[in-house]
Image (tube, coloured by chain):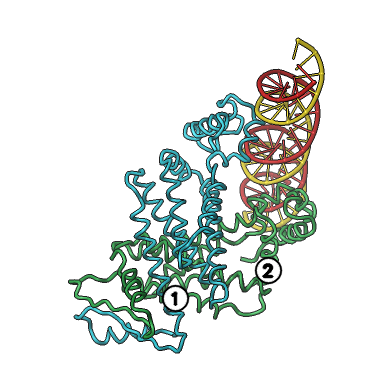
Chain colours: A cyan, B green, C yellow, D red
Amino acid sequence: MPRSPTSQRLADAAIQLFNERGYDETTVDDIAARAGVSRSTFFRYYRSKDDVIFPDHDALLAKVDARLRASTADTAIVAVCDAVRIVLAHYVEDAEVSLRRYRLVGRVPALRDREIVSVARYQRLFREYVGDWLAGSPDAALRAELMASSVVAAHNQVLRGWLRAGGSYAPFEPLDHALQYIIRTFRHLENLERPRNGGDQVVVATFPRSADPDAVLDAIRAHLGSR
Amino acid sequence: MPRSPTSQRLADAAIQLFNERGYDETTVDDIAARAGVSRSTFFRYYRSKDDVIFPDHDALLAKVDARLRASTADTAIVAVCDAVRIVLAHYVEDAEVSLRRYRLVGRVPALRDREIVSVARYQRLFREYVGDWLAGSPDAALRAELMASSVVAAHNQVLRGWLRAGGSYAPFEPLDHALQYIIRTFRHLENLERPRNGGDQVVVATFPRSADPDAVLDAIRAHLGSR
DNA sequence: CAGTCGTACGATACTCAGTACCAAGACGAC
DNA sequence: GTCGTCTTGGTACTGAGTATCGTACGACTG
């Protein structure tokens, strides 16, 4: 859906004014005036003053949700990692807007809070998805929470790096790198949680050939932990 | 610091009214009136209307920060896991208040958002702490973000369970259980990240003896991943 | 062309959170 | 007694967000 011209003019006016005078120093009347419309019209297009900065989160959330539902991945964590790519892709798509918003949000605490809340919505979506997927398995809720928060954290980390660098590279390899961390991690966790079907499992640790034997023993003990 | 009587009366009045009429339907004037003070006085004790629900987050944050600085743990993740206990302990300490707040926050979106923002502050604190600790090691920022978010997620998960159960048990064993997940996980991650000093390392995968050979190959490939 | 219906806009008025400022009382120190 | 400080109340203001009404414009129909 192509945004209406009025909506676009309002967004442009808002960004301009926020950069000129700052966010708190800009009133909705100012924005409306510069866009050449009335205050009423502003609130018809945006529910609140900060909505003009975070417009399409709802649509993006819906897209992510759809992707999750349509996923054919064989693991919850893989499905979520796949879905989070959509989010990053969306930021990269109009890098201009993302960068302007990033610089603005960095200066205005109220907007930072608002962004945190938005991100939490994605995390919640992931958590519920993984929770359904794992339903019944031990510690399902906990693992769902951990997976969701990890994926979101990885995404945020990569996104922030990309934004700080001014969007000067394609951030998808870094994202995949980070997500590999997580996938390996949770595959590892699944192994930890899978002493079933008779326990006919061989546990092996890997060490540098030069390692101190005592260190090896300590590490093995730690690895086995409270299993 | 024992809270002043006026502050206490205001908090009580607010809770009462929020439960009677709902949060949005209660004005600051109402609260002040029921507490028998003026509106001005309310804003002297609480910066905003929702501050009356989330009072001592700043103090708690400071306590957590102090604990981190004083930590003698040998691993960043252990230090953070230790620090997060303070937070849970604080909730458990006055379970009454925690439970009332929990029930209220569950019904009021604005308060939920506010709580999310508060939690993010802890996460940020953890992230910076771990980031400093790991400074220089590969993927330090990413790992710091992951550790911080995981610890916070585990804490939230345990806390929510405890609150949902009406605070009917001591939540510290569940917390330790969850934190064990994380500590094992990140110890694992450190191992993955240590193919240095010559790379004279043997990589070994572990599988049930009954596993399908193709599945084994796939898993090994995935495990090696982008290493 | 005339009538009409729906939509988008402007204008006004209102509620309420949050800020700034000032005046009055309480209370101890001296 | 008086001075200074600390707390409170009162008053006025800004600005976000809501509700409502009237109206102009265009489209569609007869």
Residue A23 x/y as whole percent: 53, 38
Q: Residue furthest left?
A: B198
The residue located at (36%, 62%) in the rendering is B132
Mark 1 or mark 2: which is in front? 1
In what quadrant of the picture does the N terminus of chain A appear? top right
Quadrant hosting residue B51: bottom right
Q: Are marks 1 and 2 on the same chain?
A: no
* Residue at image coords 54%, 56%: A120
Instruction: Indicate the quadrant containing the C terminus of chain A: top left, top right, bottom left or bottom right.
Output: bottom left
* Quadrant of residue B195 within the rendered picture: bottom left
Quarter-wise, where is residue B144 in the image? bottom left
Which is nearer the eye, B216 or B17?
B216
Disc number for residue A203: none
Q: Amino acid at mark 1?
A: Glu
Residue B99 image label = 2
Q: Residue at x 42, y 66 (%)?
A: B147
Left of A195 or right of it: where is B160? right
Please give the residue where the numbered disc 1 appears in the rendered image. Answer: A190
Q: Is residue D6 left or right of residue B126?
A: right
Horizontal side of A6 relative to A150 (left or right) equals right
Q: Relative to the observer, which residue lies in front, A188 or B132?
A: A188
From what the image shows, is residue B70 above or below residue A227? above
Letter of the chain that mark 2 sits on in the rendering: B
Image location (x, y in percent) of residue B10? 73, 57
Mark 2 surroundings: few (<14), some (14-19) or many (≥20) residues within 10 A: some
The chain letter under disc 1 is A
Residue A6: x %, y % from top left: 57, 29
In terms of secondary structure, where does tag 1 sit? helix
Give the spatial CA distance, label 1 vs label 2: 33 Å
Measured along the vertical axis of the image, is residue A192 above or below residue C25?
below
Q: Position of residue A52 (x, y in %)?
A: 55, 38
